[in-house]
Image (spheres, rainbow, N blue to C red):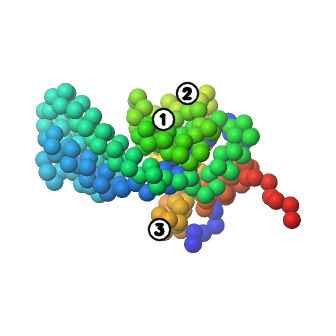
């Protein structure tokens, strides 16, 4: 079991809360191994020397390394664009295969309802595709809470680039000092800290079979202002928990 939760250093004056999607608000259990292997295979078809890319790296790093390899190999811009289009189409399709088994994480609806009632502006910043993200929000009944969403399909930099979070906050009209980013992965912490936005971590769902105590320690070391064991605890941190039932 994880150790005691890190209590928030501050809550107000919050105006906007941005969430990661998969793992934080919804559970889809994407086949990330297949996604990573697919990107490697597509890159090799376009000229990356076999063995230069590792399917054990995060997807965004595989893509970055593939681009560097292809540019260094003198690949014409047109071919590089074809690589981009092909790998995106391939992993978008794999993501959508997970949609039928995608569910809301326990406590997500109550949390978002409470935040909405308090007047917070709510957004999503995710590395999932636009198609999967919007379909997952509709399927889980969470779509009505979000007017702002940036995915890897959006124009401009994608997470973990801090610019992706800054662009979303600009769209939301939320100053950095009144913003919060919530996620369940160190990539989320990396993005928020680089953007100088406060970050609250939510430990992975128990179905992910992660060492929760170790995960909590890593989030604290990464600069999280709070670490919540689940979404119900996060709602309490943000004073957005539903009222207790009378006995």
The answer to which of 240 and 107 lies nearer the viewer is 107
Q: Which tag, 1 or 3, sits closer to the chain's start? A: 1
- The vertical placement of 190 against 173, above or below, is below
- The vertical placement of 227 against 199, above or below, is below
> Is disc 2 placed on a helix, strand or loop?
helix
Name the residue beneath numbered marker 1. Answer: 150
- The vertical placement of 17 against 53, above or below, is above
Determine the CA span between mark 1 and mark 3. Answer: 28 Å
Q: Which residue occupies 82% across, 59% down? A: 245
Q: Which residue occupies 74% across, 40% down? A: 118
Q: Position of residue 94 (x, y in %)?
A: 34, 48
Name the residue beneath numbered marker 3. Answer: 209
Could you tell whether 119 is left or right of 125 in the image?
A: right
Q: Is residue 244 at least partly visible in the picture?
A: yes
Count residues near mark 3 (Cα–Cα under 10 Å), then give few for <14, some for 14-19, many for 20+: few
Q: Is residue 165 at least partly visible in the picture?
A: no
Name the residue beneath numbered marker 2. Answer: 171
Q: Which residue reaches farthest bottom?
A: 1
Q: Quadrant of the N terminus?
A: bottom right
The answer to which of 84 and 72 lies nearer the viewer is 84
The answer to which of 125 and 143 lies nearer the viewer is 143
Count residues near mark 1 (Cα–Cα under 10 Å), then give few for <14, some for 14-19, many for 20+: many
> Is disc 1 placed on a helix, strand or loop?
strand
Q: Which residue reaches farthest right?
A: 247
The answer to which of 222 and 241 lies nearer the viewer is 241
> Is disc 3 placed on a helix, strand or loop?
loop
Q: Which tag, 2 or 3, sits closer to the chain's start? A: 2
Q: Which residue occupies 55% across, 27% down? A: 171
Q: Which residue occupies 20% across, 43% down? A: 43
Q: Which tag, 1 or 2, sits closer to the chain's start? A: 1
């Amino acid at each position: 079991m994880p150790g005691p939760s890190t209590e928030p250093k501050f809550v107000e004056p919050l105006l906007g809360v941005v969430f990661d999607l998969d793992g934080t608000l919804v559970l889809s259990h994407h086949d990330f191994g297949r996604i990573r292997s697919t990107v490697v295979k597509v890159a090799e078809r376009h000229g990356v020397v076999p063995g230069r890319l590792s399917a054990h790296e995060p997807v965004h790093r595989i893509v970055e390394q593939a681009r560097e390899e292809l540019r260094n190999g003198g690949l014409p811009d047109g071919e590089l664009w074809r690589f981009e289009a092909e790998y995106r189409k391939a992993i978008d399709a794999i993501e959508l295969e997970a949609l039928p088994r995608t569910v809301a994480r326990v406590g997500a609806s109550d949390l978002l309802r409470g935040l909405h009632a308090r007047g917070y502006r709510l957004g999503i910043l995710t590395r999932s595709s636009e198609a999967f993200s919007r379909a997952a929000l509709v399927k889980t009944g969470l779509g009505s809470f979000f007017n702002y969403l940036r995915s890897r399909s959006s124009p401009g930099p994608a997470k973990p680039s801090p610019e992706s979070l800054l662009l979303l906050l600009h769209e939301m009209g939320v100053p950095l000092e009144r913003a919060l980013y919530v996620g369940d992965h160190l990539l989320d912490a990396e993005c928020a800290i680089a953007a100088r936005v406060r970050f609250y971590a939510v430990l992975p769902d128990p179905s992910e079979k992660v060492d929760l105590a170790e995960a909590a320690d890593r989030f604290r070391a990464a600069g999280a202002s709070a670490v919540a064991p689940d979404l119900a605890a996060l709602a309490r941190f943000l004073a957005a928990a539903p009222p207790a039932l009378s006995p």
